[in-house]
Image (cartoon, grey):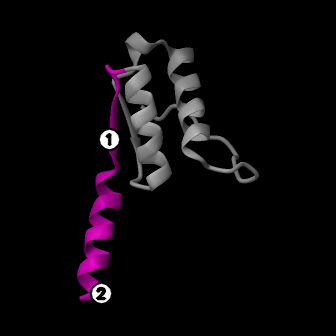
Amino acid sequence: MFRSSGDCSDDSHTAEYIYEYVKGCIEEIGVENVVQVVTDNAPNNMAAARLLKEKIPSIFWTSCAAHTNNLILESIAKL
């Protein structure tokens, strides 16, 4: 299920910022009620995933398949 969104346009989207945002959502819902987080493949999201795995190893952080496919097709088109 989609949990939330926020206007973060004035904030720097660092790995730490994303990690704290997601961790806060997970803690609000309850760690036992969260299985997976899905984001795009941006490096800051992947770094946030590593931070979260250290804190909550039971959570799966998954890269969005559509974003991955877009990146693959973009690379093919450049060939």
Q: Amino acid at mark 1?
A: Thr
In percent of width and height, residue 26 lies at: 50, 21
Give SS at disc 1: strand
Does the magenta segment cover residue 11?
no
Tell me if 17 is positioned left or right of 78 in this view.
Answer: right
Residue bearing mark 1: 62
**61 inside magenta stretch:** yes
Label 1 packing within 10 angstroms: few (<14), some (14-19), many (20+)? some
| Corner quadrant of residue 37 | top left
Vertical side of 20 occupied by 68: above or below: below
Where's the N terminus, which quadrant? top left
- Residue at 47 percent of width and 35 percent of height: 2
Viewer-closest of 45 and 54: 54
Q: Amino acid at mark 2?
A: Lys
Q: Is most of the magenta stretch helix, strand or loop?
A: helix
Identify the residue at horizontal 45%, vertical 44% (top origin).
47
Range covered by the magenta-colored residues: 57-79
Disc 2 designates what residue? 78
